[in-house]
Image (spheres, rainbow, N blue to C red):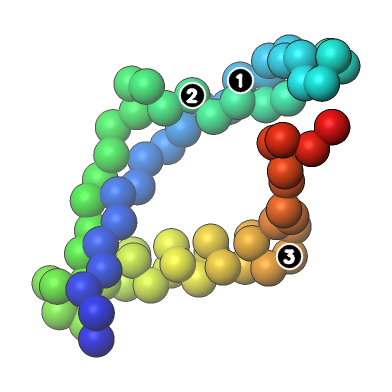
Amino acid sequence: MAAFSEDFGYYPIRPNTVVAQGETIEVYDLVGKDTTHFHHSINDGGSSSGAQQVRQARMWFDSVRETIGRDFDLDAR
């Protein structure tokens, strides 16, 4: 098995206004500059809490990408 690790942190969400392609858009920003990260690794053994955290984080990320994720071309006009 390949070695995987991940860092996890609680990112506060803040409303923000941005301009994209000349249009003002209301967005939510994840603010992570001062976020504390917690490191987890699969190298600690398959049943360790770190390995469980990594597996669950990957499962969550994959579920988001496969359901609500979408491609976005920043250069499209």
Q: How far apart are the two marked residues, 1 and 2, measured between alpha carbons?
A: 7 Å
Q: Is residue 75 above or below residue 20?
A: below
Residue visible at 38% across and 72% down in the picture: 55
Q: For the N terminus, which image quadrant?
A: bottom left
Q: How many marks?
A: 3
Q: How far apart are the two marked residues, 1 and 3, measured between alpha carbons?
A: 23 Å
Q: Are marks 1 and 2 in contact (CB under 8 Å)?
A: yes
> Picture coordinates of residue 9 (x, y %)?
37, 40
Q: Nearer the viewer, residue 32 or 50?
A: 32
Q: Is residue 30 above or below residue 46?
A: above
In this view, which residue lies farthest toward the left?
44
Query: In the image, what residue type sits under mark 1?
Result: Arg
Q: Are marks 1 and 3 in contact (CB under 8 Å)?
A: no
> Secondary structure beneath disc 3?
helix
The image quadrant that residue 30 belongs to is: top right
Residue visible at 87% across and 16% down in the picture: 23
Task: Characterize the local packing of mark 1: few (<14), some (14-19) or many (20 or more) Cα atoms within 10 angstroms.
Answer: few
- Badge 1 or badge 3: first in the primary sequence: 1
Q: For the C terminus, which image quadrant?
A: top right
Residue on which disc 3 sits: 67
Query: In the image, what residue type sits under mark 2?
Result: Val
Residue on which disc 2 sits: 31
Residue visible at 73% across and 65% down in the picture: 67
Residue on which disc 1 sits: 14
Query: In the image, what residue type sits under mark 3?
Result: Thr
* Residue 44 shown left or right of residue 32 in the figure: left
The answer to whether residue 24 shows anywhere in this view is yes
Task: Characterize the local packing of mark 2: few (<14), some (14-19) or many (20 or more) Cα atoms within 10 angstroms.
Answer: few
The image quadrant that residue 40 belongs to is: bottom left
Residue visible at 50% across and 71% down in the picture: 59
- Badge 1 or badge 2: first in the primary sequence: 1
